[in-house]
Image (cartoon, coloured by chain):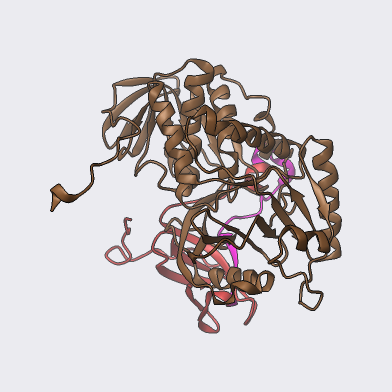
Amino acid sequence: MPDQLPEHPDWLWRTPDPKPSYDVVVVGAGGHGLATAYYLARNHGISNVAVLERGWLAGGNMARNTTIIRSNYLCEESAAIYEHALKLWEGLPEELEYDFLFSQRGVLNLAHTLQDVREGTRRVGANRLGGVDAEWLDPDEVRAFCPIVNTSPDVRYPVLGATLQPRAGIAKHDHVAWALARKADEHGVDLIQNCEVTGFVRDGGGRVVGVETTRGRIGAGRVALAAAGHTSTLTDLLGLRLPIQSHPLQALVSELLEPVHPTVVMSNHVHVYVSQAHKGELVMGAGIDSYNGYGQRGSFHQIEHQMAAALELFPIFARAHVLRTWGGIVDVTPDASPIIGLTPVENLYLNCGWGTGGFKATPASGWVYADTIAHGRPHQLAAPFALERFATGALIDEHGAAAVAH
Amino acid sequence: MLLIACPWCGERDETEYHYGGQAHVAHPADPHALSDAEWGAYLFVRDNPKGEFAERWMHAAGCRRWFNVVRHTVTHDISAVYPAGQPRPVPPSDEHSEVTA
């Protein structure tokens, strides 16, 4: 039988053994860790880099998100970094020489109440002033843009309008990771899977100079965490407490269907977000489970709620079947904004707290994080997201401002 | 879905409850004596263990009283339920030992 199986396709990256030390060790081979390694090499000429991954490459939230890419955030600091990401997304397929099916099919954020309308029109104005494409659609325009949305006035939460970001869209998340991994590898970055960080090596001055792993000690000029929901299990080893809580976030797909859904629809009020993948699955998600959890699974009533919301908005889905549900572990901060930058521990860098929305930020996260690591000071776009904001009070309050409920 | 035993009403579905995060976080006795960093830590920083976690729940659809639960954040096993204000029970040494996952 084995001789009848097709040849394995070419591997996209090497599987090297870890070297004794690196200039930079990135912890976590998800999208953000891979993008960080790629930009360290591409933008800063730092290619003596290892990305350590306790499981397999891009097997955490990078494989579990709903692939939505947009930059229509209200707060200036957020819009700036997500718009930087969107501009990078627009060039990445060509730059990485990999068609990961980035599709700028637009995103609608529906308004169902007067307050939603006020928030939406305000956000459209803020986005336009900040250079982010944004339009306000009335219900007829919503129906024209996405005919399957129920715009009847005779529903519990009628659609009163929507914001539209035409440049938003989706991409195939696993291919994004593989594209970044291949290019990082070509630059000489070592991608080391099945290598869990179990401790930190510190010198007499308290500086981090390496990591202990399940594959032995690895020296590091700088250690850059990109471990999402597991970040605080690492920083706990250093006695560094972080304002993040790890929660389950669930998503689901239907079976494959004919193309019926031309865009991405998000509803803050009814609370679901839905797109249709290229293969044909309806992909949907909603909010986090309320409790802390590291089990990559949540409670079924969350699935029930988001499906009820989807049916409210899309009666046409009534006979679609759920094929699969799953959960990831998202690291949520008190202001629903990420933490990027330096830490009180010298040589240790932090990129976490992306919560429910990290996928869309992948290239910008890597871009600003690599710059921050290379220069030992925050990148301009990352500076507002420093850990210090939880002492100064300069929060970037995206709860309720980010065009989606957290 | 979690099945949680309210100390007063008994076992009910998770959907009857409201989650309150980490238990046993005391309000600072003299907030004005704290630095900004210390006050920020009180406001924003909570434990986030992968393992046993003492946390608050409120029986929103029942007696509406707050109480504490010790739950494992990977397996969701609940090893203790006790009224608010009581200290976290010390687990018997041979039972409820650390579950690894």
Residue found 60% across the figure and 76% down from its top: B59
Residue found 46% across the figure and 17% down from its top: A46
Is residue A353 among what the camera can see? no
Residues shaded magenta? B16-38
Q: Colour of chain B?
A: red
Residue found 57% across the figure and 69% down from its top: B57
Which residue sits furthest top? A45
Q: Position of residue A81 (x, y in %)?
A: 67, 34
Q: Colour of chain A?
A: brown
Q: Observer-nearest residue: B46 or A339? A: A339
Q: Observer-nearest residue: A317 or A46? A: A317
Q: Observer-nearest residue: A275 or B66? A: A275
Q: Position of residue A295 (x, y in %)?
A: 42, 58
As drawn, is A194 to the left or to the right of A269?
left
Q: Position of residue A380 (x, y in %)?
A: 68, 25
Q: Which corner quadrant of the image does residue A167 belong to?
A: top right
As drawn, is B42 to the left or to the right of A101?
right
Q: Is residue A219 magenta?
A: no
The relative height of residue A35 versus residue A221 in the rendered view (above or below) is below
Which residue sits furthest bottom? B9
